[in-house]
Image: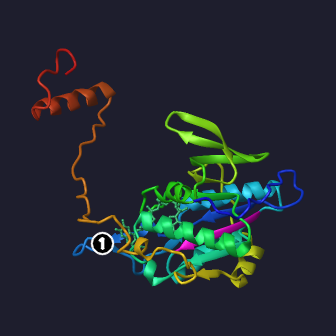
Amino acid sequence: MSSTIPMTSPAPDGGGTCLNILVLVKQVPNTQAIKIDPETNTLIRDGVESILNPYDSYALEAATRLKDKLASIKISVLTMGPARADVVLRECMAISADAAYLVTDRRFGGSDTLATSYILSQAIRFVQAQEGRRFDLIFCGKQAIDGDTGQVGPQVAELLDLPQVTSGLACELAGDELLVVREMDDGTEKLALPLPGLVTFTKPNYSLRPPSARRKLAAKKLDITTISADDLEGIDRGRIGLKGSPTRVRKAYVPPAKTGGVIFSAQPIEESVRQLAQLLVDRDLVVNVEGDAP
Ligand SMILES: Cc1cc2nc3c(=O)[nH]c(=O)nc-3n(C[C@H](O)[C@H](O)[C@H](O)COP(=O)(O)OP(=O)(O)OC[C@H]3O[C@@H](n4cnc5c(N)ncnc54)[C@H](O)[C@@H]3O)c2cc1C
């Protein structure tokens, strides 16, 4: 499935053709503010603040840090969503993005992660063909804080036949490769990703830069390229929207809030432990407090 468009020659030494980076971003409800409709058990989206998915801001910062070292890098951002998702694209342009693409069409509504990834990969192919050059790097968030599946980045990489690294923390260019420090359960590891490739990013231990006032003003006037289903000529209509989504949500419910709980705060700590052990005995959860540990 690899594109026939030739790869841009990366120029880590600062000369010649610039590196072309695409950051996939998603507008998500601010989960701090989410409310559930008790009748339907669905999210109440009306009036809920929308924000740039935090993990996508880490991906954008990683791209921006590469650009700090190599000014000729071009950063583009792309989102699939409703027309109002242009807000997050402008937010990215106010930080560092040079170009923005909004993939929007009612026919995309109801897409599950597989359909979403398919549409995104088709849109990426479309932009590459329009621009006559391919993206050397595609950066994503590790997960979106609403859907939370973490599937889109890896699926897009598969659909575009690209090598991928997940849970990136930081990266640097080294010749034709990107060295990525990635998070693991018990530490970190460093992997060399051949270009073109895709990286998903998790929360780094450094701060993100805020948008500058000058870029904020400029971003308001910048053009955003809109892409619809009709633009994606070769797209398989059987793989988009609700009908093209194999996932079926059988039931959605709000988990019951945990109630009760006992806090043991007696001092010294041994007294709290004694009280806890007694409670376990009283509730028939252990048989012996005095002897060996249950
Ligand atoms: C059956 C079903 C029906 C659905 N119907 C709808 C619906 O009608 N309307 C709706 O809004 N959602 C719908 N969704 C949710 C939608 O499928 C997901 O929001 C979407 O697939 C992304 O998945 P995620 O949020 O788990 O992303 P993750 O895989 O967790 O995201 C990882 C990264 O992928 C990138 N990414 C993810 N989504 C996008 C995007 N849209 N644009 C650009 N980059 C992206 C970002 O970099 C993000 O950080 C539905 C889901 C299912 C399962």
Q: Position of residue 94 (x, y in %)?
A: 70, 72
Which residue, given by chain and number where applicable, does mark 1 sit on? 42
Q: Nearer the viewer, residue 99 or 252?
A: 99
Which residue appears at 65% of the width and 73% of the height? 127
Asked if one can make out residue 205 in the rendered structure from this viewpoint, the answer is no
Q: Nearer the viewer, residue 88 or 214?
A: 88
The answer to whether 25 appears left or right of 290 in the picture is right
Q: Position of residue 17 (x, y in %)?
A: 84, 61
Which residue appears at 40% of the width and 74% of the height? 238
Q: Position of residue 91 (x, y in %)?
A: 64, 72
Asked if one can make out residue 272 in the rendered structure from this viewpoint, the answer is yes
The answer to whether 200 appears left or right of 221 in the picture is left
Magenta region, residue range: 74-80
Which SS does the magenta portion mostly show?
strand
In which quadrant is the N terminus drawn? bottom right
Q: Position of residue 79 (x, y in %)?
A: 56, 71
Q: Is residue 165 magenta?
A: no
The answer to whether 189 appears left or right of 73 in the picture is left
